[in-house]
Image (tube, helix red, strand yellow):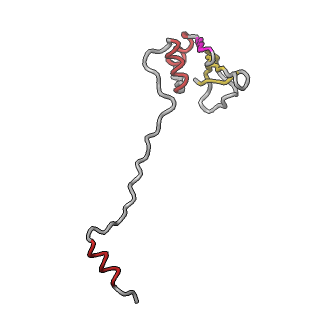
Amino acid sequence: MKLRPAGRKGQRSFRVVVVESRSKLLGKFVEDLGWENRHTDEVRVNAERAKYWLSHGASPTDSVHNVLVRAGVIPGPKIPVHKVKPKAEQPAPEVSVPTDSSEVADASSTPVG
């Protein structure tokens, strides 16, 4: 089960469709279950057919799962679609600082050559 885009650019709405797992997004679909309009926050899904397909092994994408939860077709929490990546810790650069002032004086008084 996937969301299939419909409408003009900038005014997209989405159709909830049942498709084969390897088919293209805008290609053939098995059944149209409903629609979602994100601009008006409207959702309409045929609950009976959605439950039928879920019982026959259709797996919804995370976005379709959230649409089905909003429509009241399936119970449970929504799935976070945009996962926040943890920031990678950067190790602090190592700087060697002499602790004893006599070591600095010995190094500068030694002739090089």
Q: Tell me if residue 73 comes above or below residue 105 in the rendering.
A: above
> Which residue occupies 61% across, 21% down?
18
81 on left or right of 31: left
Quadrant showing the N terminus? top right
Q: Please provide the residue range marked out in magenta.
A: 40-45
The residue furthest bottom is: 113
Our reading of the magenta stretch's main secondary structure is strand
> Which residue occupies 52% across, 17% down?
68
Q: Does the magenta stretch include residue 57?
A: no
Q: How many labels does the image show?
A: 0
Q: Position of residue 90 (x, y in %)?
A: 41, 51
Asked whether 57 or 112 is in front, the reply is 112
> Which residue occupies 26% across, 75% down?
102
Q: Position of residue 75 (x, y in %)?
A: 44, 15
97 on left or right of 47: left
Asked whether 94 or 26 is in front, the reply is 94
Q: Tell me if residue 75 comes above or below residue 59 in the rendering.
A: above
Which picture quadrant has residue 23?
Answer: top right
